[in-house]
Image: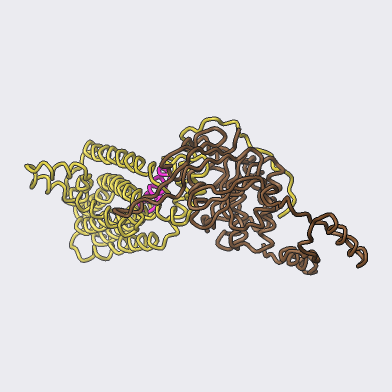
Chain colours: A brown, B yellow
């Protein structure tokens, strides 16, 4: 059973009188399997948010259909097993972190000690235990994103829809969210991740789909899509110069050509995180 | 983030999602919490309380106990009626647009929450706001009446102190009349019909806000409908032969029906049967309007 299935899903927006209609999504056939992390990529206006809104029945399709765990998306039952984190989420700023989770928990029919216990677990999971009684008006962007993730997880859904979950979040917060997505995957959750950050998607996603102008233009397994079968990279350590010359000679004698020889580089993100780790005062987070 | 263990799943054995009054109540209470933080609500309520409180001073310019009490009742019931109507419009007009603008509606409707539950919850919150604000104004009204009553009794007692038996009896009669005038059940009837009227105005505002995102439009249109409803009786008499005008007037609620304050101040007895009729009319209209709001909101693209 697919966690998400769409067939010929199409959405046209009315632009107003005599302005025609905008084709936001064009016959999308999407299949997100249970337990996988699927990355939905695309430039602004490509139809990513429209897809998420259609899946959540916030807007109606012009044509085609969508299902969540084989339940039609226009049936409220389909949302029993879905958690959603919108892009740049706003919450009721006068509520504290814990009160926010109580509100969303009650909407999901939870109450009493089970809700209390769930809230404590989630605050711990997203690292907001110390900020639980602070009003959201005093939360940083990263903290709002994390409380947003907690509310999406409150009813322990099988599927998570994350729309730009790291938008505006610093590298530490971004890494935390990435780690959390991987942990959720380990727990058997299905995740649909819409993001502009390609490096992040590459790190966490099993499969990706690229949308452009409402159409799926590329889809597949991340590893097979990005690997170049004609090229081979071997990383060696402490190789003497004479040995290197022999290796290069062997490559040439085999009829292959050397494209580049260089020292491997770390990523800027790794360098940044490593520097913060070494700082004896700890990671820069005020919560 | 910490390495918390995998969280256990809450009970998820549902395969149906029925209508839930609990969800409506959760959304309603949250709406009330949000609404009472609005500066415009606090301002309107304060204005109402100040006017009701100042009725005690206005009454001093009238002669006679009964006249003074009449001024107080007239002022206070008028203020309660106007302020509750304004709170109904202003307090309800931004409920849906602000949810959409702040995108909080996305996180709520992404949960197993029906749109009707959401809409009803918002309306419930608005009604709670009206009940709360009217209760505050009625408390102030009650306090003003009590202070005036005590002051009148004190004055009458002092005036006739040490006078003849007949004068004392006259004083007692006047005190009794003051007490009767203060404990006038007609005021309860007026407040009840005002509450239903304000709820009806709130439902009209909610209906308008289901298809409009402009705050100005959401305030102006219900206000115009309210004014048209207040003049409906006169308009029906004038245009009774025009079918189109009568058809339009049939849609507009007759807000003039809810004005009992005039009858009360003229000393007319308002029978409970009439009050019941007005309340049933208001509630029936409200149900129709909320259902119409649901039909529009359930198709709205968010």
Q: Does B41 sit above or below residue B255?
A: below
Q: Considering depth in this image, is B122 or A200 the residue closer to the camera?
A: A200
Does residue B126 belong to the magenta stretch? yes
Residue shown at 55%/42% (left/top)?
A106
Viewport quadrant of the C terminus of chain A? bottom right
At which x and y percent is residue A146? 62, 55
The count of marks equals 0
Q: Quadrant of residue B54?
A: bottom left
Please tell me which residue is depicted at 51% across the width and 52% down the height of the picture. A212
Taking the image as drawn, is residue A100 in sight? no
Which quadrant is home to the N terminus of chain A? Answer: top right
Q: Position of residue B285 (x, y in %)?
A: 27, 40
Magenta span: predominant SS is: helix
Horizontally, residue B214 falls left or right of residue A103, namely: left
Left or right, B19 with respect to B293, comes to: right
Q: Is residue A182 visible?
A: yes
Q: Quadrant of residue A186?
A: top right
In-front residue for pair B274/A17: A17
Query: What span is colored magenta in the figure?
Result: B119-134
Residue B142 in magenta? no
Where residue B116 appears, as percent x and y from the top left, is 41, 40
Q: Position of residue A185 (x, y in %)?
A: 69, 44
């Amino acid at each position: 059973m697919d966690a998400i299935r769409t067939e010929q899903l199409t959405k046209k927006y009315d632009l107003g009188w005599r302005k025609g209609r905008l084709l936001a999504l064009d016959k999308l056939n999407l299949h997100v399997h249970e337990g996988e992390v699927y990355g939905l990529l695309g430039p602004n206006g490509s139809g990513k948010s429209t897809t998420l809104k259609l899946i959540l029945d916030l807007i109606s399709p012009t044509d085609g259909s969508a299902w969540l765990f084989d339940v039609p998306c226009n049936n409220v039952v389909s949302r029993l097993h879905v958690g959603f984190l919108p892009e740049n989420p706003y919450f009721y700023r006068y509520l504290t972190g814990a009160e926010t989770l109580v509100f969303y928990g009650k909407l999901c029919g939870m109450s009493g000690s089970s809700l209390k216990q769930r809230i404590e677990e989630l605050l711990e999971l997203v690292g907001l235990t110390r900020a639980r009684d602070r009003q959201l008006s005093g939360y940083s962007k990263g903290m709002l994103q994390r409380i947003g993730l907690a509310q999406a997880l409150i009813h322990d859904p099988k599927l998570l829809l994350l729309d730009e979950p790291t938008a505006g979040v610093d590298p530490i917060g971004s890494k935390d969210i990435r780690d959390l997505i991987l942990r959720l995957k380990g727990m058997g959750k299905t995740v649909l991740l819409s993001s502009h950050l390609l490096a992040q998607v590459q790190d966490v996603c099993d499969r990706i789909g690229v949308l452009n102008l409402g159409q799926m233009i590329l889809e597949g397994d991340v590893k097979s899509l990005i690997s170049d079968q004609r090229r081979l990279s071997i990383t060696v350590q402490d190789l003497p110069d004479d040995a290197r010359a022999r290796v290069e000679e062997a490559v040439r004698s085999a009829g292959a050509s050397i494209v580049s020889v260089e020292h491997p580089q770390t990523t800027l993100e790794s360098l940044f995180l490593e520097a913060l780790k070494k700082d004896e005062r700890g990671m820069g987070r005020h919560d | 983030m910490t390495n918390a263990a995998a969280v256990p799943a809450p009970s998820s054995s549902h395969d149906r999602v029925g209508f839930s009054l609990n969800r409506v109540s959760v959304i309603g209470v949250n709406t009330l919490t949000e609404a009472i933080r609005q500066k415009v609500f606090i301002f309107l309520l304060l204005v109402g309380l100040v006017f009701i409180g100042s009725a005690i001073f206005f009454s001093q310019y009238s002669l006679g106990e009964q006249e003074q009490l009449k001024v107080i009742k007239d002022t206070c019931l008028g203020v309660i009626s106007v302020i509750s109507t304004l709170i109904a419009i202003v307090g309800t007009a931004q409920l849906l647009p602000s949810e959409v603008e702040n995108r909080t509606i996305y996180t709520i409707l992404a949960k197993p929450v029906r749109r009707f539950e959401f809409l009803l919850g918002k309306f419930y919150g608005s009604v709670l706001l009206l009940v709360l604000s009217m209760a505050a104004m009625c408390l102030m009204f009650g306090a003003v009446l009590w202070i005036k009553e005590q002051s009148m009794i004190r004055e009458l007692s002092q005036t006739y102190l040490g006078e003849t038996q007949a004068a004392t009896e006259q004083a007692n009669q006047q005190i009794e009349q003051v007490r009767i005038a203060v404990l006038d059940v007609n005021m309860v009837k007026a407040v009840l019909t005002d509450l239903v009227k304000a709820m009806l105005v709130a439902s009209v505002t909610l209906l308008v806000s289901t298809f409009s995102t402009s705050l100005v439009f959401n305030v102006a249109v219900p206000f115009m409908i309210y004014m048209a409803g207040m003049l409906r009786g006169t308009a029906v008499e004038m245009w009774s032969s025009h079918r189109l005008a009568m058809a339009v007037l049939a849609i507009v609620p007759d807000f003039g029906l809810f004005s009992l304050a005039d009858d009360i101040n003229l000393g007319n007895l308002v029978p409970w049967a009439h009050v019941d009729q007005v309340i049933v009319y208001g509630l029936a209209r409200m149900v129709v309007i909320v259902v119409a709001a649901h039909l529009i909101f359930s198709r709205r693209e968010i």
